[in-house]
Amino acid sequence: MRIAQVAPLYESVPPKLYGGTERVVSYLTEELVRQGHDVTLFASGDSVTSARLWPGSQQALRLSGAPASAALALHLLMIERVAQQAYRFDIVHFHLDFMPFSVIRSGGFPAVTTLHGRQDIEGQFPLFREFDDMNLVSISDAQRSAMPWANWIATVNHGVPERLYCPCKPERRYLAFLGRISPEKGADRAVEIARRAGMQLHVAAKVDDADREYFETVRGKVEEPHVHFLKEIGENDKCAFLSKAAALLFPIDWPEPFGLVMIEALACGTPVIAFRGGSVEEIIEDGVTGFIVNSIEEAVQAVERIASIDRRQCRAIFEERFSARRMCDDYLRVYERVIDEAATANGPQFDQAAMA
Amino acid sequence: MRIAQVAPLYESVPPKLYGGTERVVSYLTEELVRQGHDVTLFASGDSVTSARLWPGSQQALRLSGAPASAALALHLLMIERVAQQAYRFDIVHFHLDFMPFSVIRSGGFPAVTTLHGRQDIEGQFPLFREFDDMNLVSISDAQRSAMPWANWIATVNHGVPERLYCPCKPERRYLAFLGRISPEKGADRAVEIARRAGMQLHVAAKVDDADREYFETVRGKVEEPHVHFLKEIGENDKCAFLSKAAALLFPIDWPEPFGLVMIEALACGTPVIAFRGGSVEEIIEDGVTGFIVNSIEEAVQAVERIASIDRRQCRAIFEERFSARRMCDDYLRVYERVIDEAATANGPQFDQAAMA
């Protein structure tokens, strides 16, 4: 199949450090190429891929510090270029939110849009209502809740390459927190859970400029003696960081549409103690791959029961449900459906050879 | 003529306080209606106009605090709605920068885009090069300098309604500064010029959140005893504020594409002492409507010579060159040209009545 993947330009594909969307696009792209598909990746010029790369910007925009207007211009230009070349692809897979909708409609080419963010933003609803002919893929069922009326054609959970993270010899002496230090991610809750459970907490987290103020309010907690603050870690260190943890704490305070770090933990055989909300119930099986809790109290109790979780089972369930291969297969089925429907809608196609 | 004006949604048309683009769109729209044209204004729902209003959002986005993604969605939806109704207009006049380019091209309707901002943003150039078929209007010749290769079809200087600001009995005891407190606008220079010239400085300025940090660095200057800080003033107070000033100081440190406040001062008969750059040389006639200077030293000397400027002449030149009526006439000529060219490009049109 001839496939275009169109990624945001804010981070490279894959991103150097943080950047969930670009990382998932990378996993999908590499798996599609591995399976023999002809893939063109529209992404920042410093991306690294085995697909054909079409650079939408010289480098990732977060690094180059491009002003917002330039970022918008570069994305709109990339969308225009995709449309101009659309005849060369069987399917175009956009990861740019609603930005390409108008161009998809006027171009009339087969396209799928995966929405990667939270969708409970009222100001966006009228646009999604107007473009109710767009093929939307959700990354969890929970993500749909704010817009149940939208044209969702599938849910495809994210997946991670099977050999990227593997269980290594665990120490199991600490609880892990991995992500951003932000109000939504609940680092302060993690500190409290570990303290009450009498465990060390290892925090590998970045602090965005936007979250700097919040960080100052919780800095005292992060500097408590039972907390070991590692700042942002790269892919290479993640496996050891997660594998050696007794459990990953995922004490979110927002409807996270898909918590990638949960499946990374499972890939390492590490169970997850997660606060109910967003996609958590779709990813974690309570009592099997971790515990779903509603309060700090319940989380502390879950830490005490964590030895009852079979870590090999966590890994096995990761392989079955959350590998990049499974994600890729799901998307290929979506592509085939969209291509079939586009062909039906357009009526029988002329065979150019027959007309010659 | 059936005309659509499409304004940004950040401020109402006209804006409650600051907002150059929305203010100019309002002046143009009202003058077009006054001249008998059939005008539809696409703008925020709290806009006030004698044209037909099509609300792109309930209220101005700066006030509603909509997140950036919602702001983008609402603008894209408004553009789509304009395109769907484009057959009802002889011409569509966009004030949304490059955002509607793709829709204009695929829609194929007669359209003009006035660029209101600075254009020396490299990341935008590739998009403007791709869309070299768009009809662009500059607000000064200086604005073109960063993109001389773009498809500029006219320069139309801004204009202000003739009776909005009038000379009133002047006190001429202070120098005036009106605008934002930001590094580009040079409030610190104004303080210095007034101090050295031995004059009072009255500052009517708002402080944007983005400029809060800069404001703290110059706060000491604004609080000097010869400075009177009025914060942001409304339209009603502007006339008295400008009329009673000996001169407006416009000590900019950026290539301002069009300094609306300069023509507001001239409308009040108040001469302008402006730093060379951007559109200044196109607006101020050195020695006639004020002085163009290159340094604080030269500005101080200009203050000493300010009585040599004929304030009636300032008002007369305003009426001749910078009235909303003149701006409107200029735009009507642009519209006619674009409509003619579109008709020629599309070949002879069928007369629907003749076909019946």
Image (cartoon, coloured by chain):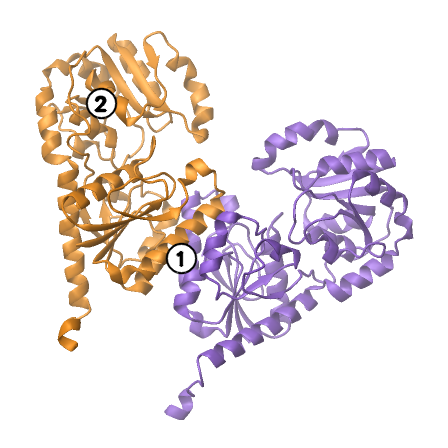
Chain colours: A purple, B orange
Residue A352 in view of the camera = yes
User: Which-is-in-front pick, marks 2 and 1?
Assistant: 2
Judge whether A322 appears above or below B252 on screen: below
Q: Residue at x 66, y 54 (%)?
A: A258
Q: Residue at x 28, y 37 (%)?
A: B23
**Are the residues under badges 2 and 1 in a single subunit?**
no
> Residue A77, labelled with which disc?
1
Judge whether A338 appears above or below B197 on screen: below
Q: Which residue is mark 2?
A: B239
Q: Residue at x 17, y 38 (%)?
A: B324
The one of A306 and A134 positioned closer to us in this rendering: A134
The one of A48 and A279 positioned closer to us in this rendering: A279
The one of A233 and B212 positioned closer to us in this rendering: B212
Helix, strand or loop at label 2? It is helix
Chain label for disc 1: A
Q: Amino acid at mark 2?
A: Cys
> Residue B123, labelled with which disc?
none
- Residue A77: x %, y % from top left: 40, 57
Q: Amino acid at mark 1?
A: Leu
- Residue A51: x %, y % from top left: 55, 66
Helix, strand or loop at label 1? It is helix
Judge whether B8 appears above or below B289 on screen: below
Q: Residues within 10 Å of mark 1 (few under 14, many from 20)?
A: many
